[in-house]
Image: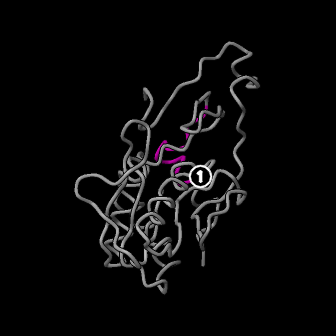
Amino acid sequence: MKLPKDQVLDIFRETKALLEGHYQLTSGLHSPQYFQCARVLQYPKYLHLFAGEIAKHFEYADVEVVISPAIGGIVVGTEVGRMMRARTLFSERKDGKMELRRGFELKPGERTLIVEDVVTTGGSVFEVVELVKQANAKLAGVGYIVDRSNGKIQFEAKHFSVLQLEVVTYKPEECPLCKDGSPAIKPGSRGNY
């Protein structure tokens, strides 16, 4: 049984991982809300809880390797991999392009689960899907903690989110928060927060 949405939101609020204000997301979109998963995942009990939900959903997918896009997905991906007794690795950007580095590799036919913290447009995950295809590995699924698209983003495999909701986003040129003179904060791994 999936965790109730209200319980997940309460955990995010309790850990100050749900931020309210004016934010520029990794996708470039602006939003009055930002999920800073690193804040909630610093608590082992919540890391275990959320990773456990993802691992449980894919327990019969015969996952051999878990891969996460750096930097947000690394913590949850490693815990999901540990729970599933699967090898874990991560991709990272070099010159703006997602790639495998540090000697990491996917093997042909290897059943691969992609794990991310937050999905808005799915950009990073789609890039990792391409890495899986390039390696001729098999995409077993995609798991993530927060789906900000409320199910609108579809991947080429079974996918699962612990929390699914639609969070308001704006193109920068249409953002009412910008028009009100509020500066957008860029939190997360590629920002200033």
Reply above or below: 55 against 93. Answer: below
Q: Residue at x 44, y 59 (%)?
A: 131
Query: Which image quadrant is residue 178 in?
Result: top right
* Residue at image coords 60%, 74%: 158
Q: Which residue is mark 1?
A: 122
Vertical comparison of 36 with 47: above or below: above
Q: Nearer the viewer, residue 46 or 97?
A: 97
Q: Nearer the viewer, residue 122 or 181?
A: 122
Q: What residue sits 42% from the left and 45% below the top?
A: 39
Q: As displayed, is residue 94 above or below residue 142?
A: above
Magenta segment: 10-20
- x, y percent for residue 72: 42, 48
Q: Residue at x 37, y 53 (%)?
A: 91
Q: Is residue 188 magenta?
A: no
Q: How was this image coloured?
A: one colour
- Figure quadrant of residue 90: bottom left
Residue 149 is left or right of residue 188, and the answer is right
Percent position of residue 112, x then y: 43, 72
Quarter of the image with the C terminus in it: top left
* Residue placed furthest toward the left: 103
Residue 21 rendering spot, x and y as whole percentages: 61, 29
Q: Residues within 10 Å of mark 1 (few under 14, many from 20)?
A: some
Q: Is residue 12 left or right of residue 150?
A: left
Q: Nearer the viewer, residue 173 or 78?
A: 173
- Is residue 19 found inside the magenta-colored segment of the image? yes
Which part of the image, by quadrant, shows the N terminus?
bottom right
- The quarter of the picture where residue 156 lies is bottom right
Count of numbered labels shown in the rendering: 1
Return the x and y of residue 124 as percentages of the image width and height: 51, 50
Q: Amino acid at mark 1?
A: Gly
